[in-house]
Amino acid sequence: MSFQSAVIPSLLQTAEYARLALAVGRGVEAGDVAKAAAVRVEAQTVLFDGAREFSFLLTEGAVRTWPGSPSLMLAQLDRLGQVATLSHVKLGVVPWAVKVPAFPLHGFTIYDDTASVVESLTGDLTLTGPDELAAHVEIFEAFAGVAVYGDELRKLLEFIADDYRQLVERLEK
């Protein structure tokens, strides 16, 4: 389970988004960014293993935060739409139009109910305490309860894509 309030999860990033995400604020050397992005994209093959299940939850803020051009985000939205069609992947987005159940202070990824990893600017924090895991699961489930999925998700992604298209037109003038 992955909850992200400010960034697209690495397993869902396009190559260009991954390159920019790694280049800014993650301490990756400039010469290593392309290699690190390639490794990140290569790791995404796990998404196509039907024996595994994935659950991603993003806030609309994460989907609207653009580290590059609006065109880059159009490709990223297309990627999200494609991944959402996989039967073993559940992707939800919490729209701005709903009241959130808590402040989304940071993102986290829970692995097999044994550890929750919180990414920070300087490194990752791995939490394994039962109370910490329970708190993260509770927050994930609360946000999942107000997220949109399926057809509603596709409508929201298209609405956001329209905004990015308008930005492309405006910036090209």
Image (tube, grey):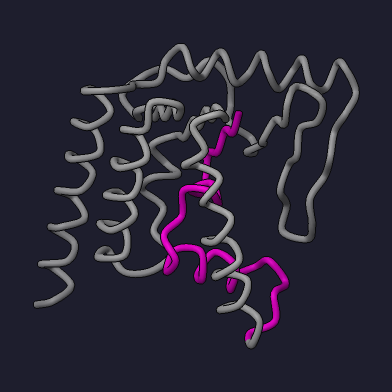
**Left-right relation of 106 to 46:** right
Image quadrant holding the C terminus, namely: bottom left
Q: Quadrant of residue 136?
A: top right
Q: Residue furthest bottom?
A: 31
Number of labels in the image equals 0
**Left-right relation of 111 to 7:** right
In the rendering, at what x and y percent does residue 11 appear? 53, 48
Q: Quadrant of residue 94?
A: top left
In the image, what residue occupies the spot 23% across and 43% down? 160
Frontmost residue, 85 versus 165: 85
Relative to 64, say whether 99 is above or below: above
Relative to 16, say whether 66 is above or below: above
In the image, what residue occupies the spot 38% across and 45% down? 63
Image quadrant holding the N terminus, namely: top right
Frontmost residue, 108 versus 54: 54
Frontmost residue, 62 versus 19: 19
In the rendering, at what x and y percent does residue 88 appear? 45, 26
**Left-right relation of 47 to 103:** left
In the image, what residue occupies the spot 44% across and 66% down? 15
Q: Quadrant of residue 153?
A: top left
In the image, what residue occupies the spot 55% across and 52% down? 10
Q: Which residues are magenta?
A: 1-30
In the rendering, at what x and y percent does residue 24 appear? 59, 70
In the rendering, at what x and y percent does residue 37 appear? 56, 69
Asked whether residue 27 is drawn in magenta, I would say yes
Asked whether residue 11 is drawn in magenta, I would say yes
